[in-house]
Amino acid sequence: MKQKLTQSFLQYAGLLGVLVLLIAVFSLSSKNFFQTQTLVTIANSNPDLIFVSVGMTLVLIVAGIDLSVGSLLALGSAVIGVLMVRHEWSLPAAFSVCLLVTGLCGLFNGFVSVWFSIPSFIVSLGMLEMARGGTKVITDSQTMYIGSRVEAFGEPLQGVPLSPAFLVAVMAVIAGQFLLTKTVFGRYCVAIGTNEEAVRMSGIRTAPITIAAFMILGLLCGLASLSQTSRLSSADPNAAIGLELSAIAACVIGGTSLMGGRGSVVASFIGVLIIAVLQSGLAQLGVEDAIKQLITGAVIITAVLLDALRVRWGKKSG
């Protein structure tokens, strides 16, 4: 128990150390980086990635993966836009349908993967194309401007520089960490990712738990849809392309295993902040997009290598 707590402390301390180091480096390199407005902008620009990373952590822990999250976000945004612009629905009603659609897509991914024993990589890859195609069909491949009716969720609160979207995203992180570490569902997720056959032999049905993890991710994609739509005041059918890679990267940087059985929602949240600070700092330094991608990829590979070394060290010391 003491060894596990020590490893968790070292993990969080290491991630926070990297985050602080990045902030320090960019603050010294750019006069405008270490300002309240810059840090607030970083926070308010990334709730959608935070939402998706929370759900992705759960899916990765059960040894699954979902490549369709970017397309689901765009689909949910399109649903909100079409219902509010063309049919004059209220935001709560349109958002409810958005959650229903993205939640059902997540449920579909989990159900097909589990019941037909198809790798979730393949199922979600198909959903990626289906959801993106559906988004373009219902929007006629046109960006739909919604306007001020949807902006409140993404705008900073009066007297508080942070947006409701970011505050709700932080609440999702807290809820996700509680679900993972303090509930039976969370313990079963870790057990399934570690050794699913052993869990089955102990009399526990693994299918509903795995499917639930995918559905939770789908619902969080719906929240991410609202976050991005409110920030952009529009529904873009080409939105969130590549979001799945950013979410997986954040989880990996946070120490979540791609093989399942290990991960932390809070650590994934810190991983999101590391990616956000890195990209924002490089942008302020005028680094080209291609170089930013190269550096971000190198950081991800480094994180994986360090995590592998940490696991190896843990086995030797155990």
Image (cartoon, grey):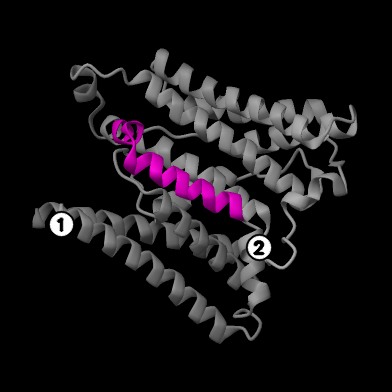
Look at the image and tell me whether residue 49 can be seen.
Answer: yes
Query: Which residues lie in the magenta part?
Result: 167-189
Look at the image and tell me whether residue 309 can be seen.
Answer: no
For residue 75, side relative to residue 183 (left or right): right
Q: Which mark is residue 99?
A: none
Q: Is residue 93 above or below residue 309?
A: above
Residue placed most toward the observer, 312 or 60: 60
Q: CA distance from mark 2 to mark 1?
A: 37 Å
> Is label 2 in a helix, a strand or a loop?
loop
The amino acid pointed to by label 1 is Lys
The amino acid pointed to by label 2 is Leu
Q: Which mark is residue 2?
A: 1
Relative image position of residue 207 (x, y in whole percent) = 37, 19
**Location of residue 167 (image quadrant):** bottom right
**Location of residue 196 (image quadrant):** top left
Residue at the farthest front position: 159
* Mark nearer the N terminus (2 vs 1): 1
Residue sitting at x 40%, y 68%: 16
Classed neighbour count for the residue bearing mark 2: other residues with Cα under 10 Å, few (<14), some (14–19), many (≥20):
some
Classed neighbour count for the residue bearing mark 1: other residues with Cα under 10 Å, few (<14), some (14–19), many (≥20):
few
> Is label 1 in a helix, a strand or a loop?
helix
Q: Quick check: is 182 in the magenta stretch? A: yes
Relative image position of residue 61 (x, y in whole percent) = 36, 38
Q: Is residue 317 above or below residue 159?
A: above
Q: Is residue 15 above or below residue 212?
A: below
Main SS, magenta region, reads helix
Return the residue at label 2.
162
For residue 82, side relative to residue 218 (left or right): right
